[in-house]
Image (cartoon, grey):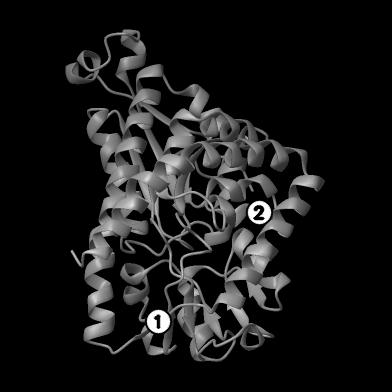
Amino acid sequence: MQRRQFIKTAGFGAAGVAAAPFVSTAQAQETYTWDMVTSWPKNFPALGTGANDFARRVEELSNGRMRIRVHGAGELVPALEVFDAVSAGTAEMGHSTPYYWRGKVAASQFFTAVPFGMTTTEMNAWIYHGGGQELWDEVYANHNLKPFAVGNTGPQMAGWFKKEINSLDDMQGLRLRLPGLAGEAMNAIGVSTVTLPGSEIFTSLQTGVLDAADWVGPYNDLAFGLHQVADYYYTTVWNEPCALVESFINLDAWNELPEDLQAVIREAARASNLAMFTEFAFHNAQALETLVDEHGVELRTFPDDVMQALYDATREVIQTQTENDEQSRRVYESYSAFQQLMRPFSDIGEYAYFKGRDSIGA
């Protein structure tokens, strides 16, 4: 891929100078126009629109000194080539999710979701306060990138299945769309997994290329019409108790920015992270009601033997990866230690509240 020249122009609005008193006048007069390539269909609910919202926040907070042009998957580069495009400087920014890059950066998976791992609240705490961001910066710097959390889907469903799963035997030989560590764990129990962009899931289920597919949750799954091509919706949250959405920036472009615009991006990312999570929470509740009440979707949970097999396989997959990749070992040690730190309060906090609420039928 060809490295592009970063677009930087001069502007003379007084508002730009006033908004950035700690940078030089010359810096405050410069404006920047960047391209953001994404792994999502253009304007796709929450994910694609989340990229748009992030770009809007950057432009507003910078008083127009920074403009980001958002490109849907396939417009400039394919969905799963975003990482390479931004690393090479073909575009300044990307919007995707880290576990898509496991073939290039094994440790990236820990920054999206770990099966039986941390929730969104716990994950955000690790990124912002537990050393996660620093490790993430280190991992991506090797690929000329600077990463930020810009969203989270919250807990994701186990996926859509064409047949009912009553035992571990029913999983054998299934062809399933499922990325990341969860996909590797599924492989270990006899399922054949692939990573496909979201735009290919419906057709792959419809034509029999896939027997089952994970996507996100009710909000996005309804938008793709997955209930039309698979009868059973497995709600067992094991694979992705949360799923972090990222934006990453070409490191050369990032280093060229004045400090005030770097601060704008940081704060826009934090705001976008919260906004996407709350959007998913609200619309997932609405979409689940629609799927069940209007479309007659049958909700299911995996049987105990499947869950035990997946837990055992997850531990083996992580152990193998961390033994063979020093970067993964360091990242997972931090992740795991932080999860153990958070667990006692999570148990006596929200988990205890949910149990108490259920016990009285509230």
Query: Does residue 121 lie above or below 48 as drawn?
Result: above
Farthest front residue in view: 360
Foreground: 110 or 143? 110
Q: Amino acid at mark 2?
A: Arg
Q: Position of residue 172 (x, y in %)?
A: 68, 85
Which residue lies under the disc numbered 1?
Answer: 226
Give left or right: position of 68 versus 330.
left
Q: Residues within 10 Å of mark 1 (few under 14, many from 20)?
A: many
Task: Locate residue 296: give its quadrant.
Answer: bottom left
First along the sequence among labels 1 and 2:
2
Residue 13 versus residue 80 in the image, above or below? above
Q: Position of residue 291 (x, y in %)?
A: 28, 81
Q: Is residue 159 above or below residue 67?
A: below
Q: For mark 1, give the secondary structure.
A: helix
Which quadrant of the figure contains the C terminus? Answer: bottom left
Q: Is residue 281 visible?
A: yes
Name which residue type carries label 1: Leu
- Position of 160 relative to 252 (above/below): below
- Tell me how many marks there are: 2
Q: Residue at x 63, y 83 (%)?
A: 171
Give the residue at x 51% y 86%. 205
- Residue 107 lies, in percent from the top left, at 66, 45
Q: Is residue 216 left or right of residue 17?
A: right
Q: Residues within 10 Å of mark 2 (few under 14, many from 20)?
A: some
- Left or right, residue 346 beside residue 333: left
For the point 47% across and 39% down, the residue is: 342
Q: Position of residue 349 (x, y in %)?
A: 34, 45
Residue at 53%, 53% (x, y): give it.
113
SS at badge 2: loop
Q: Is residue 84 visible?
A: no
Tag 2 residue: 102
